[in-house]
Amino acid sequence: MKETEKVKLVIEMRDRGYAQRLAQRLCELCSGLEIEICRKGEFCEWNDTADGYHLYGGCDILLSDSERACYGLPEHTAFLKLRRQEIFLPAPRILELIAMAYEKKTGRGFLLKSESDAQILSFCAEQGGAGVTAICVTTARLLAGMQEGAVLYLQLLPPDADENTTPELVTCGLPQDRDNLAWKAAEAFYARTGLPREGLEIFISKRIPMQAGLGGGSADAAAVLRALNRAYDSPLSIPALCELGAQVGSDVPFCVMGGTALVEGKGELLTRLPPAPEFFVVICKPDFSVSTPELYRKLDETFIEKRPDHKSMQLNLQKGELLGIGGSLCNVFEPIVMQEHFDINYIRSMMYTYGAYGAQMTGSGSAVFGIYDSFEYATVACTMLKDKYSEIFLAKTV
C-alpha cells in the first residue's frame, strides 16, 4: 500500500481520553492510518428499527467498546471490539488486532513505520511438536500484510537433520515396566478377555509434558485398550472398556470414551454432555511439577470456598456459549498451588490479557490452559508466553 492510500479508522469509545491517547500512539506506530475519534452518536448513529449503525462519514475500520456496534455495518467495513481485558493491551498489540481484522475483511494490509531496514523475529523450542512452525508461519503472514517490503520465513535445521532418520529412543523418565499405565492396560485387557498373550510391543511417542495434570499417561492407557480391542475384532464394548480402564487409573475411562462428559465418583461414573463448541486451546507448562498425593493432603486441610458449578457448565455447553464456558471453569486445587507458585497466576493473567475467554490450571497442575475463539488471539498469547516459558502448546478442539 502506498503512503497516499490511507486506511480510515474510527475509534468509538465511552472514554474519550483513552481514545485520544490510543489514537496518538497508533499514529506514531502506523503511517497508513487516518484516525477519527467519536462518541456514540457523533460519527455513528444507532437505529433500532434498521438494526444497526449508519455511518455518517464512512470508514474502513470501526474500533469500539460496544458489542452491538457490529450490527448493520457496511459490508466493506471491518469491525473490532475491544473486550474489557484488551483495553489494557499495549498499543502495538492493539494495532496487530486492528491489522488482523482489516486483513481478514479485505485481504489487504496497511503500512507500518519501521526504524530499521530489517527486523528479525526468532522462534525456537527444545523439541518438536511445540507449535513453533505454526506460530512462525502465522506471524510471517501477519507481517506480510502489515509491513511494506518483503517478509522472509526461514526454518533452520541441524546440518545432519534427515526427516527419514528414525529418531533415537529416549525414555524421558517413563517407566519401562508394569509401572507404566500402558503396560497395565494391556495386562488388564488380556486378563479380562482371556485371549492368548501374543508378542506385543508398545511404542509411545509422547508430546504431552509429564507431570502437567494433562492425563498423558491415562490417554496412553486408553489408546492401548482401544487399539487391542480393535485388533481382536472388538470383543469388548466401550462401556466395558471404560469399566476395565477404571482398574488402571481414574482418568482412563474418560479417555476411553472421549468427547465431552461429566466425570464423577473416582472417574468411573461418566455422563455424556453436549459437545463443546469449536475453540483453540493454549497450554503453558511452567518448569516445576506438583505432587498429587501431597496436594490431596493439603486439600483435606483446606476450606474450599468455590466448587465447580456443573449445572452452569452444562447449560453453557447446551447453548454453545464459549464465554459462559470460560466463566464456569473451576479447579479446587488451583488456590492451593498458587500459594507456593506465583507462575500459575501470572500465566492465567497473561492468557486473559491476550484474549482468553477462560484460563485455569489443569488437574493437579502444573500446566495452565486458556481457551480462545480465534487462532490469531491464541497465536499472540503463545508468542508472548514464549518469552518466559519453553513448553507452550497450541491445539484445537475436534
Image (spheres, helix red, strand yellow):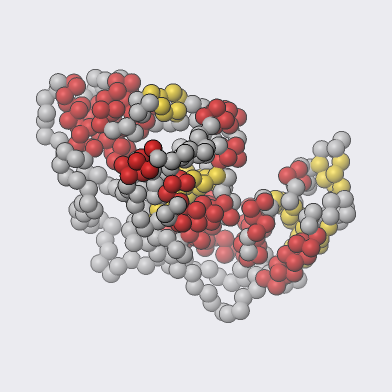
Q: Quadrant of residue 157?
A: bottom left
Residue under the point 74% across and 52% down: 64
| Residue depicted at x 52% and y 46% | 359
* x then y, percent, for residue 217: 29, 41
* Residue 360 seen: yes
**Left or right for 313, reference 263:** right
The outermost residue toward the bottom is 116
Residue found 61% across the figure and 68% down from its top: 147
- Label count reads 0
Left/right placement of residue 199 relative to residue 21 reads left
Relative to 270, residue 383 above or below: below
Q: Eyeballing the image, is 108 above or below 280?
A: below
Quarter of the N terminus within the rendering: bottom right
Image coordinates for residue 208, horizontal then vertical, percent: 34, 47
Residue 156 falls in image quadrant: bottom left
Indicate the position of residue 263 as horizontal and vertical percent values. 41, 28
